[in-house]
Amino acid sequence: MNKDINYNDFFEHSPEEIDPIFKQVKDPWEYLNYREEFFKQFQEDLIESDVGNNIAIIGEGPLIIGKNVQIYDFSTIIRPAYIGDNVTIMSSALVRNGCWIGSDSTIGHAAEVARSFIFYNTNIAHKAMILDSVVGSGCNIAGLSGAANANSKFKKNKNIKIQDIDTGLEKLGFVLGDNVNFAPCMWAFPGTLIGKNTIVYTNESLFLKGVFINEKKIIINNLFS
């Protein structure tokens, strides 16, 4: 049975609070549809923090870095990128190809974030991988976990569907609502949705898929047993 998917089951903030460019966002994954339009607003870089000389900044497009941002040695930023105030990016992290990272968030050592929205005060731990995803505020994604997207390899030119809804996206990792805690060493299949205020942990399985709304705890047993 399909579940109703409502924006408010995922995020407390309205799309306009993030930026007026997102005012037409209705479904929680739709931020990704407006990513390119968001970056087109910026004609030049806006860098308000001293990020040092031991990081790599490459690629094309605008780079926006807010106040009191710390980026540790050997990290790589591939433009375009938006990095809010008080963000910390630990050593050897990779932030690439159109990321939006909200204020007071942390990207852990050797983590990779690509083409994704990470909202406010969220922690992405060491060696996590977040691709083509939307992650709410106040989330904690533990180490060695995340959302990769294999859809583009196996289903070329076909959009990801969630239940019967065509997302309009050929690539989609996961959507995590506000205040989700995501267990270590867990991986989500493309198009997985987890509503706000949810704890995800595992007994055996390393894989998660589906739509989870209004479930305070998700215990994942062996998917392949």
Image: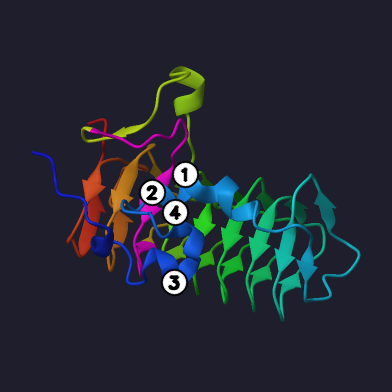
Query: Disc 1 to disc 3, how far (Cα)?
Result: 17 Å
- Mark 4 lies on residue: 134
Badge 4 amino acid: Val
Residue ID at (79%, 44%): 59
| Label 2 with label 3: CB-CB less than 8 Å | no
Q: Position of residue 147 (x, y in %)?
A: 46, 44
Query: Toward which corner of the image does residue 216 lie, by quadrant?
Result: bottom left
The residues colored magenta run 165-181
Name the amino acid type tagged 2.
Trp
Asked if disc 4 and disc 3 are in contact, CB closer than 8 Å, the reply is: no
Identify the residue at image location x=82%, y=54%.
Answer: 57
Q: Position of residue 182 (x, y in %)?
A: 38, 59
Q: How crowded is mark 2: few (under 14 residues within 10 Å), some or many (20 or more)?
A: many
Determine whether label 1 and label 2 are within 8 Å by CB: yes
- Secondary structure under the numbered disc 3 in the rendered image: helix
Q: Which of marks 1 and 3 is nearer the N terminus?
A: 3
Which residue is at the front of the view, 18 or 124? 18
Q: Mark 3 points at which residue?
A: 17
User: In the picture, which quadrant includes the C terminus?
Assistant: top left
Q: Residues within 10 Å of mark 4 (few under 14, many from 20)?
A: many
CA separation in Å, label 2 and label 3: 16 Å
**On the image, numbered disc 2 is attached to which residue?**
29
Q: Earlier in the sequence, mark 2 or mark 3?
A: 3
Mark closest to the chain's N terminus, 4 or 1: 1
